[in-house]
Image (tube, rainbow, N blue to C red):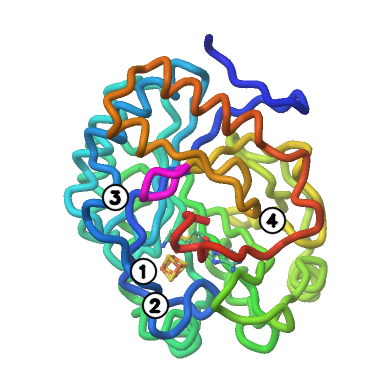
Amino acid sequence: MDSLVDRFSRRIDYLRLAVTDRCNLRCIYCMPPEGVPHLDHGEILTYEEIIRFLKVAVRAGISKVRLTGGEPLVRRDVERLVAEISSLRPSLDLSLTTNGTLLASRAEQLASAGLKRVNVSIDSLDPDTYRHLTRGGDLNAVLDGVEAALEAGLHPVKINVVTLKHLNEEVEGFLDLVDRLPVYVRFIEYMSPCGAMDSSYFVSNAEIQARLMRREELQEAEPPPGAGPAKYYRFPGAKGLLGFISPVSSHFCPECNRLRLTADGKMKPCLFSREEVDIKGILRGGKGDEEILDAILCALERKPSDHGGVLSFTRRTMSQIGG
Ligand code: SAM
Ligand code: SF4
């Protein structure tokens, strides 16, 4: 078997793998101020367990793996995991989503270990707003991380911006960033998870785009490889691109190609569904590759056609699922 196709004929080749539920920030749209209770270390999949699972998943048809969390760079020696995943199949599209706070000193090692590219979350280019949104984050450290990622060749560097009404709608600063650096800035519509903020903070990407177009003429751009659900635009002279990911105002479920594995080894067929398939139980229950494959197929079977209009989750926060 080398391809995974679900009941709705979607080819599923992308796995988002949360390597930890811990984080060194407390973004206001992701977590309550006190954070979320941490899983015990014994609950988290070991690197050996992750590799064992991935061997089967990659053979079955997963060709893109994204490490996420929590904050993946707070898990000890994540470079070792990157190197081991990369050696499973060097052509794997291996990427990582990070808040960037620890990236400046790690980008080079991550690239050497086999990481291909990186997504960095930066919700404002104003240091005070950034600190407020992340409950204490240092914007300069993150911007140093972006520069280090570019220097290390982790292309394309994508910047994720979750927009929130009245809090960080002043997004024009990102036009200057894209003008100056070859990065892809993507505006992401806020989805209201449990324990964080309510949906009154939602601002549509149509509003964000209109705001940007008052200053620059945006022209539709060819989506870069691995663009996922984003729509891309460029403006004259800019080194980078602007993208819009609109999970709330537009429906990209028909193109969904993802499965998710949580840090405690549960496979989620859809970000919003309550369904989970217990991979850890199989890995720790002395079962073989056949059973691991069956569990992946079981998650595939349970993948819904769409989220049925439900855009909030009731069991886990984003940091526990991996976004
Ligand atoms: N800590 C890393 C980071 O912040 O990039 C990786 C994990 S984070 C859960 C993954 C992505 O989910 C980030 O880009 C973050 O902005 C996004 N995210 C978290 N909560 C969200 C929400 N309520 N709505 C939309 N995106 C969200
Ligand atoms: Fe941490 Fe990422 Fe959630 Fe922010 S979005 S609290 S950085 S996991």
Q: In the rendered image, which quarter is residue 229 located in?
A: top right
How many residues crowd around disc 2 within 10 Å: few (fewer than 14), some, or many (20 or more)?
Answer: some
Position of residue 95 relative to residue 186, above or below, is above
* 301 lies left or right of 64: right
Determine contact: label 2, label 4, CB under 8 Å: no
Residue type pointed to by label 1? Val
Residue position marked by numbered label 3 in the rendering: 44
Residue position marked by numbered label 4 in the rendering: 245
Separation (CA) of disc 1 from disc 2: 21 Å
The one nearer the camera, 286 or 245, is 286
Prevailing SS of the magenta stretch: loop
The residue shown at (61%, 30%) is: 300
The one nearer the camera, 284 or 159, is 284
Report the span colored magenta: 261-266
- SS of the residue under disc 4: strand
Q: Which mark is residue 142?
A: 1
Separation (CA) of disc 2 from disc 3: 18 Å
Residue depth check, mark 4 versus mark 1: number of the one nearer the observer: 4
N-terminal label among 4 and 1: 1
* 235 lies left or right of 240: right
Q: Which mark is residue 35?
A: 2
The residue shown at (28%, 34%) is: 284
Determine contact: label 4, label 1, CB under 8 Å: no
Residue type pointed to by label 3? Ile
Separation (CA) of disc 4 from disc 3: 30 Å
- SS of the residue under disc 1: helix
* Residue at disc 3, CB closer than 8 Å to ligand 2: no
- SS of the residue under disc 2: loop
How many residues crowd around disc 3 within 10 Å: few (fewer than 14), some, or many (20 or more)?
Answer: some
Determine contact: label 4, label 3, CB under 8 Å: no
Separation (CA) of disc 3 from disc 1: 27 Å
